[in-house]
Image (cartoon, rainbow, N blue to C red):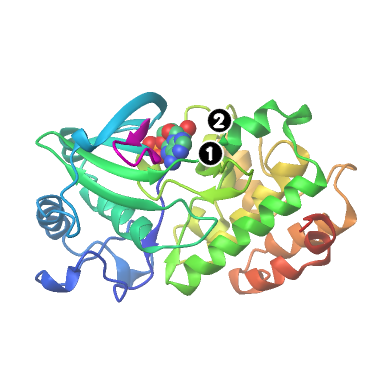
Amino acid sequence: MGLCLFLIDNTMSIIQLSALPGDVHLATPGCPPEYEVENENMSRQLFEEIVSRSVKTKEWTRDDFEIGCPLGRGKFGRVYLARVKYSHLIVAIKVLYKSEIRKSNVEHQVLREIEIQTHLKHPNILSLRTYFYDEKRIYLVLDYAAGGELYKHLQDSPNHSFSERKAAKYVYQVADALNYCHLNKVIHRDIKPENLLLTLTGDIVLADFGWSVHAPSSRRKTMCGTLDYLPPEMLDGIVYNEYVDHWCLGVLCYEFLVGKPPFESKDTNETYARIRKVDVRFPKCVPEGAKDLISKLLRRFPAERLPLPDVMKHPWIVNNKGK
Ligand code: AMP
């Protein structure tokens, strides 16, 4: 699972950034120039300050939780099922090792995860309730997504694909979450089945607002790995905007219905070439309505991609997603 949110601008300051000196630039290469990493040291310093601050309302510690079975593993630690002692509230706790974070030089990405996930409140976005730390670790207390990874559900489905009904529901929910992110000046940049979890009721939650750039999924069994979701403008390393998420939504919709992403090829260069040409081939199984939607999202020129509110109102979505 992976990273990939960043602040479109730094007006969305979180965790009292305003109390800290200077601006914070949390972007990565390929981001619009105004978000370029201006001073790596600044994000390091900020990281130190933030982790050394307590959550205002309560000083949580590991002792407040009964830690249960592991739910999964990320690059810098594990995620566990946990229960708040006394209240018996079930949560997921992501345990990150400070030494690993420092070694990999990803302090700014941890900041992103904490900042963005704490402040985005939407039914289809995984909530980060609080965080705390000890000498060696940082603990992120997350809502528990009891349905697990969407990627696994997709792999376990016949032909690795979903019914129209399920695909339309999931695309609607991801579009809704992304629309909310964009309204809050946040671009996800890494939409793919590995980064989506399901709740107990089978609804999507966008997860992992951390560091997928540094933790490419080893589970994706394609020759090109996660290249499959890269929009052409990111491939070319040119300035991009929130429309990268619209592209990924088109790729996601295709994969849900076909069982593999549209530009999957034998080798990386061929995938690159197909992405650049927007060489999408629809098998017969893809209904006309879905073809129309996917074609309106997979456009070479970002501004031509269908706006997210229109995705949610698209006839194929409306007719298939159910209530
Ligand atoms: P991550 O470190 O975010 O990549 O998470 C590693 C794995 O832990 C994921 O692939 C999920 O299987 C699992 N996981 C992460 N967060 C949660 C959560 N809130 N609820 C349930 N499982 C989770």
Taking the spot 83% from the left edge, 60% from the top edge, the residue there is 316
Taking the spot 37% from the left edge, 56% from the top edge, the residue there is 117
Q: Amino acid at mark 1?
A: Glu
Taking the spot 56% from the left edge, 68% from the top edge, the residue there is 179
Q: Is mark 1 within 8 Å of ligand 1?
A: yes
Q: Quadrant of residue 149?
A: top right
Q: Is 88 covered by the magenta stretch? A: yes
- In this view, 194 is above or below 280: above
- In this view, 40 is above or below 228: below
Residue that label 2 marks? 220
Q: Amino acid at mark 2?
A: Arg
Q: Are marks 1 and 2 in contact (CB under 8 Å)?
A: yes
Residue 1 visible within the image: no
Residue that label 1 marks? 194
Residue range in magenta is 80-91
- Image quarter in which the N terminus is found: top left
Q: Residue furthest bottom?
A: 11
Residue 158, how many percent across, how many down?
78, 28
Q: Residue furthest top?
A: 69
